[in-house]
Amino acid sequence: MTMPRGGFTDVGLHTGGTPRATSWDLVQQTLLAVLQQSGVCSADQQPDAILALALAHLDLWLLSQQLQLLRPETATADMLNVCMSMLDSAARKAAALAMDGHNVSSFEAQLQIAAQRIQVATAERAVQEGNQYMLPASSSDQGPGRSGMSGTWRLPSGVVPAAAVPEALATGRHAAVANATAALGALPVTTTGSTDTGAAATAGLGHKLQQLQGLLQALNQHSGDVAAQHAISSVEEVMFGCAVAGFDNASSRLQSAADAEALMQLIALYRNMVSMYRQSTAAAATMKIEVRSREALLTWVAYCMMFELAKSQEPLVRSYNVALSWRDPQYFVLCDKTAVEATLSVSSYLYEHSSPSRHQLFSMSDSGKGTAAFAVQFVAQDSRLSGILRQHQLDMDLSVEKHDAEVQRKKQLFAQLTAEASELTSQISTLRGQLRPLEAEQADLNRQASSLSRRLWELRFAVNADKLVEKELLEPQYALVQSQKSAVDKKVSPLQSRKNTLESKLADVNRQLQAAREAPASVIQPLPKNTQNAHQWVFWLHKPTVLSSLADISLLAQQLLLPTPCSSDVQSAIQVTDMVTSIVQHYNTHQVSRYHRPVQLFTGSQGLVKPFARAGVPGPSTIGPRYVDQITSKEQGVWYPDDLLPVMTWNGACTAADNSNGFPPTFNPFAAIDTTITADSFTERLPAQHASLQWTMLQLGSRAATPLDRGNLGIARQDQKPCWMSKPGYLAFTSMRAYPLMQLRQLCIALREQHLPWGHPAVVALVKQTVYQLGDLIWTNDSSTSSSSTGSMQLLWRRHWEAEGQELHALSYELQLLAEKLADAPREHDAVLLLGQLAAYLADWHSGCKEAARQFAAMTSKAAEQLGKQLQQARAHNQDGIARQLQAKQSKARALSLLCYGAGPLDASDVAHMLQLMVLVKHGDLLLADTALADELQQLRVQCHWVMVKRLPAVLAVLQQGSGISRRHAVEGPAGLAGSPLMTAAVAAVLQWTPPELQWVQLTTAAGHAWAGFHAEGSDGHLYSLNILDGTVLLDGVPPSRLPSDILQHPVYHCCFGSSNFDVGFTATGMYKTLRAIDGCYYSFYWAAASSTSQHGSTGSGRELVILETERDTGEQLQLLDVGVDGACGAWGRELPLRLRQLHSHWLNRQHKVIVLRPKHFQQHSVSFLIRYGVSDRIGGQSPPAAASSASAEPPVQATALWCWRVPHHLTSEHWLSLLSNYAHQLQTQPMVLADSSEHLRILGKFEDAAYIHVYASDKALSAPSAGSAEAQGAHVAARSVSTNLVTVPELLFELPRFGLEFELRGGCLLSKAHSGYCLSKYQQLVGQVPPRDSAGPVCAPAGAEMEGNSGSTSSSGGSSISSAVHYTLPGFRQYLVLEPVQEGSSDAPRPADGYGSKMVLVPAGQVVQTGSSSSGGIPWAGTASVAAPKHASATLLVHKYAVHPRFGHLRASDVLPRLQLAALYAATSSLMPEPGSMMTGAQTAVQLIRQSWVNRPLSPEEVQHLETAAACAGHLAPALRLLVVELQGSASQLQHLYDLAGAGGEDSGTTSSSKSVVIKPEAAVEYRLQAMKVLPGGWPLHRKLRLSSDVEVQVMGASSTAAASSMPAWKRLGQFHAIDASVPRCPVSPAYVEECEARLRNLVTATHTRSALKRSHSWLGLKRRQPDNSKCGSGGISMPEYPLTPNKSSSTPLESMMHAELQQSWEAHHSTSTPTAIAPIAATVISSMQVNVSKKRQEIQGYLAHHISYTSQAAGAPAAAFRLLQLSSSVASASLLDLMCCAWQPHMLPELNPFLSGSACSRLHEGVLVWLQLCVLEDKLARLGQHVRAGAAAASLLVQELLVYRKWDVAQHPKWLVFEVEGQLQIRPAQYDIAEHLITHPGAIMQLNMGEGKTRVILPMLALHWAGSKKHVVRLNFLSTLLHEAYSHLHQHLSASVLGVKLLLMPFHRDVTLTPQTARAMRAAVSRCQKVGGLLLVVPEHRLSLQLKWHELRMKGDAASLAVCEELQALANMPYCDMLDESDEILHHR
């Protein structure tokens, strides 16, 4: 710990953090004290005022020094923060001085200059950044935004690999054997089984363990499930066999410590192998609990072996109990008799070695007491350890003696130095006595001399006689005093020198005395002093290897009972955290002390069990007294670790097997854990879809532990019955494991009643758990049940089960009956998966079960044979799909048959059948489109492998009985003695031509290790090979119907074919060719010799794999090209783009010189790209060869141009030949090119990695060869490289495939194909220049304004102009593209639109990250931001689109997610410098965007991520941001319970339910409160854009902190200022101006229908109007059609007649109304001129508002000066355009923006704001009209409609409507207002509207803004469920994500939601808050009705909780709602 000095207030210890900067406060107080007390200040000067002025000037000076470092290249976010902070500090001090009456005008001027310099540097930096990302301009560019061609391009090139021929085949027997050995995949086997004879059988257990280690190490080099299964089974065979034989048997006993170490190593290898198997996909085929149980059992067997070895080597062990409990194996789940008997043997051994009177050895259950007692006894008896202890005791005694000698030496030295110091002190005292009178005399003489000298100095120019006399008298006196003083000095000097010398010597003696008094360094002994404690230490440090291994295996065996993965509850129960000191480390560290080094050092060691102590070692300085004079005995200063008692600690076995178990770092495996948890951990998990039945699987084992109601749970829970199970079946299922002693009887009943679907996965798991789990163990002394007279261990629930008439006989009987029943029901053979394995398991106990198992095997084999006949018929008719399904069923039936041999005795016929089945299963592999069926077959194969692996010893025993099988080396060896008909028959099942007699030889290695593989040489000269583990059959080293493993494992094959295999034939040329066509194609595989021009990848042995695809119908051949291990495509394709290399397979056709790019999987033939090569080396050279012609196959030797064409999506399914011939014209126009240099590519590269951008050249760019033209001269074109063929390309297409974006370079513009009507803007950074304003002011132009004339760097000399003209946003962020509207004309060259329309910004969707600094073009940016995107080529990325508001320039998002990402971007790029467009910092903009993103639905993970990013990046700049994030997260999770139910509906699509509570960090709230409580000089509160609303403050912190914001400053309250009144004139534009303009526009449309008017208007618009031919005319001569529904007066009823009369009246009224269709010819001129005038008026009034809203006169006094100073540093808000909009309906904001405005001035400005907004609406309208005029006749109706729109309503009454118009760039139509006004004045009215009249998009927002503003009601909008999402999105975008800030609330209720009083109260609180803030509640009828029905449902329940919920729901229903019904006819329909 450190103690930094931070000033007087810095107290307490520090932890290394930054100390408080209190020194500057101390300096300030010191300066103030000096000014107050030193007399520097005059009477009229105030010290505190002078100090404040000085400090202000100091801040200004520091700021000026900092600004010397500020340049465009250094204007980073960090630098801006420093400068703005210093500016703020200086401005605040100056403002305080101004409020104290100081004249700060010069100070203000200097601060203005400083602020201007900051703005200039930032603006210049932004301009330079913008200049770096400008699209290149073409020479013909005549307007802004035009981009021409720039850069050089070329075609990609490559060296196509030469054709490869199959390598020469090796011949002869040796070659065949070598090939067979490589392809057979045989695995080594051990010779440790029970069938071994000779030396192997008599070898000890240690030799077996070494063999097993070698086997596991060898098998670890093999991949696949068979190798892992074989390794696991081999170890278990030996270990379980030892346990069954008995641990006292000689063959099961360890002999030495080396055997113990070998056993521990074997356990580690075995567990690692099991762990790897668990992590493989094959593990899904087996019961996870069984694998875990076998692992635990094997470790327990090893423990018993180790304990037996310890007993034999250390007799003391016999006096102690084992550490493990004999009852714990009851949890094991084991599937074979050997494992069960091994478990019983283990339990018996543990039972026999457990006695209540003895302690446990190496157990932590008794806190290690037994182990401690054993340690004491063992060391006392062991001579080696006793000798070590004695030697240590001698060494420790010597250390004590030497330490004491040092103490005595220092004591003597201390006494000597004490006496010497006393003598020196006496001498110094004597000298001081002598000096005292002399020093007094010396001082008196000095005073006299000083007085005389001063008087003589005064008389030096005396002319007066008296003074001359005085001078003459004083001069002798002065001389006398000087002589006396000199004499005294001579006496004092030697005495003083002597005194100083003695004092110096005394100081040295005192220092030596202090050092001598310090006690010598203490001694920390390595062992305790207490003998018994020392014995424990020595035991743990030097225990024998056997005991160390026993300790390790004890804790490991107990650990394997713990649940895995470890839950939090188990972690808490077993975790050990109080271990402090390592015994071994302490011992090894402190054997040597500074006083003594032993002659012999002993190194303590530890195994996996580590001894630790809970206490710590004291520090050396705390041991013994501090001083030697306090030491009274030898033991003082010596410390013995007697308090450090060794405690066993366990960190696991420290192997890979324990990495994923989730155990704590240190834990106690013996800790008490609830038995229910342990039992549950050994219970198999049902599949996820059946998890609701998991409770039926758990069984606690004993009757006492079983709940009494367990048997009734199934009856009580019948509502949980799944649909796939009948009611009787459900009851049978749930009662199966209800009671442990009844479960076998329940199984018999279930087999008899046949209510369970035996093939269902849940039933399979239940029955296996029932039969395999051991359950309670019992020790019985019943001699009738065991040959042992001492008793035996039995399974309680199986006791006497084999007796006649008991469960075992009943099971056998029922299984046989069931086998007979299923024999004739092939569709029910899925049950064999369970029943066959069950019968095989029971066959080890009852022979009848073996018969049942064989019946199951026979029936499935018979079914497979029948399917084989159907399969032949399907193949004969080329029915590939049916054939695959039949073959799958056949393979499944054979696998089920093989599983019936998993246990039980085997005879020769069984082994023969097993081998045949395994071979047929292996060679029945096939391709399946049905992934579920493929997965099922794969799991069955894994189970078949388990059967063969476990039965391998028995199979080998049967094969070796009379077969004469010999072993020989894989290459050399004697022939076999006799044939084995069993293996010959297995091979004949696949190879029907196999000779009847074969001489089989078992393979062995050169070292003599046997393999599970056999060779036989037939009389026909062929070599036959068989792998009996996986069924592989080879003919001459080749699988007869399968590809060899070296091809299957080759990367080229695996890339496209995966794990698929084929039926192939081996040709004479060395090719493997598929026997049947797959999707119309044959495939050939062969090895070829690698050459220099061969493909990129080879096997490393000089060979390459060649794969050919030959079409059955056309004979066209394609060769699969190798992309290489790194995916670089080698020499042939390294220049292709990354996606083309990594995401496709590449197929070469040499005849047509084409490369076809398809999806990777070989069965997907859709063509994505076509590449032609060898057609020409020059761009614009010869045409390529024809598709149908034959060309020379000579391979090119040099790089050739690659013409790569992208295939259009609609043509990808076409054949590649058809593409070349029939669709060539659609391909040849866009070949892919590479960029050598390109500005366009560099610009796009800031958005997407250039490696993933594809560039295509059009036909105008390249003289492209025709993809299908005839090859006339292509054969003789010389081949050479194209790397130098560079051209200038005029037309290009840029594709960003990961984003789905395309940009086409046409006419100088990069047109976006994904966003029609848009092109890339010339300026690709959001940096622009603002047109000059009429007057300066804080109201800035939009950030989206056009950037003009900034093509060069801007110097600081023009800073004043550039800082006011340049605007920017998101500084430091480049990863976006800017699009602008394009105007399509008649010419081919599109141009950016000059008129109405907004820009668009495209940003990648993803996580926002802050980067340290980046550089592009020489401008480094610190604190830049980027969007993290995946780097892999296959990623599909999304794009967020942001519209730039044409007027205000801010970015607008259409949804919450992109808006929150934008907030994160602003936060990541934020600094303290406000952006000129919005007048807000990035943090403040982020606050605004998050406010606009308010929702009450669960947030998606991406939205939460963006919120957290924003808070992390800018929370320190705006504390309100963090609280706002918390508020949004809280609101989003408030109604979480409504969304937790799937399908709750509403707007929650894409969101994720998260029950994680949102907690505010206390420091965030404190930081915000401190900021909000601060009052700036002059009484101004916190910046309004950094304040939270009172509603949010209450939601987040429980109380509002805005009191300071609403309080009036004292100077304003007391009237100590001059208000601005007369200087604010009325608005320069009359409010009637807008009405006049609208009237002029309406007059452009006439209502006449005369033929001349129609002719004039339509001729101007280019229209032709058909004349009406109706005979009937209405008013004004307008023709009127006849009423079409004339009633039959004779038969009509009065009601019918009345209805027809009303309809006819409506018809005539409609047709008599004049229809305005004529438009004045001068309309275009009027619109154009009016647009110019209105724009001028709008700019004029905008300048008026900008000037007067920020104007403060000098007459306003000191507060105005302070206000201006604070505005310079942005401490108080400056008005922006968006602020002015808010003032429209919040006039009280005007005094906040300028507190010096009078009431009348505010009224005039408010009137000006309303006029300005009306002009904005009018200007937008004129822009739309201009657009319609330019569109011509196509927009005639729209033009008329727009001209007739005018404002009928009062803007003063509805200012929010006006703001809604401005933000939405629309205008409310008169008809829309009429409807809204009618509904407002007539509550309950229903209005019928036609489609397209703006009901949802205009009228509903108008009504909502009107009624929600009063806050008297909860405005509830009722929508149809199909329209809710669209309505919510629109309203959220235009009401919530706007300055209006209306919150939208959703409440998607469903009856299945479980309500509590708390959740119901949350619903009411949400609606209540919605009312308070003027929000809108959006509902659908289903939600309301569900809530009402839920109330009725709860009321009928009647319990207290339900009634409490009803009360809350009733209160919710009684709230004052104002309902608006959209589509009321549907909502109110009686249905």
Image (spheres, helix red, strand yellow):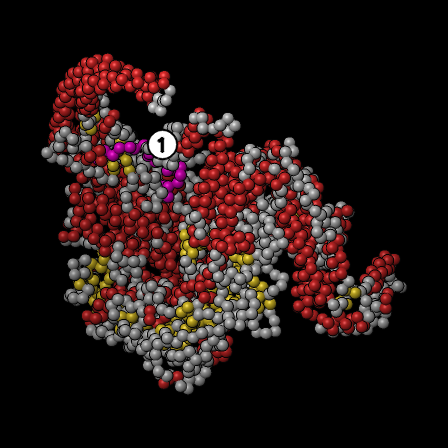
Membership of 286 in magenta stretch:
no
Q: Residue at x 64, y 46 (%)?
A: 1748
> Which SS class for mark 1?
loop
Which one is nearer the viewer's eye here, 897 or 1164? 1164
Q: Report the magenta residues as a range.
A: 562-584
Q: Is residue 1804 above or below residue 1331?
A: above
Q: Would residue 1369 be found to the left or right of residue 1065 on screen?
A: right
User: Given the current orientation, which residue lies at the most extreme bottom position?
Assistant: 1272
Q: Would residue 1984 be found to the left or right of residue 716 on screen?
A: right
Q: Can you say which quadrant of the picture contains the N terminus?
A: top left
Q: Residue under label 1, please give it.
A: 5
Membership of 576 in magenta stretch:
yes
Q: Is residue 1383 above or below residue 1796?
A: below
Q: Would residue 1125 be found to the left or right of residue 1483 on screen?
A: left
Which one is nearer the viewer's eye here, 1178 or 1578? 1578
Q: Residue at x 42, y 39 (%)?
A: 739
Q: Position of residue 1358 (x, y in %)?
A: 51, 55
Q: Position of residue 1588 (x, y in %)?
A: 57, 40
Residue 1144: tell me if it is visible: no
Q: Residue at x 23, y 47 (%)?
A: 266
Q: Would residue 220 be found to the left or right of residue 1958 on screen?
A: left
Q: Position of residue 1281 (x, y in %)?
A: 35, 76
Q: Is residue 1324 above or below residue 368?
A: below
Q: Position of residue 906 (x, y in %)?
A: 28, 55
Residue 556 lies in what quarter of the image?
top left
Instruction: Classify 10 Å Cα crowding around label 1: few (below 14), some (14-19), many (20 and above).
Output: some
Residue type at mark 1 is: Arg
Residue 1312: tell me if it is visible: yes
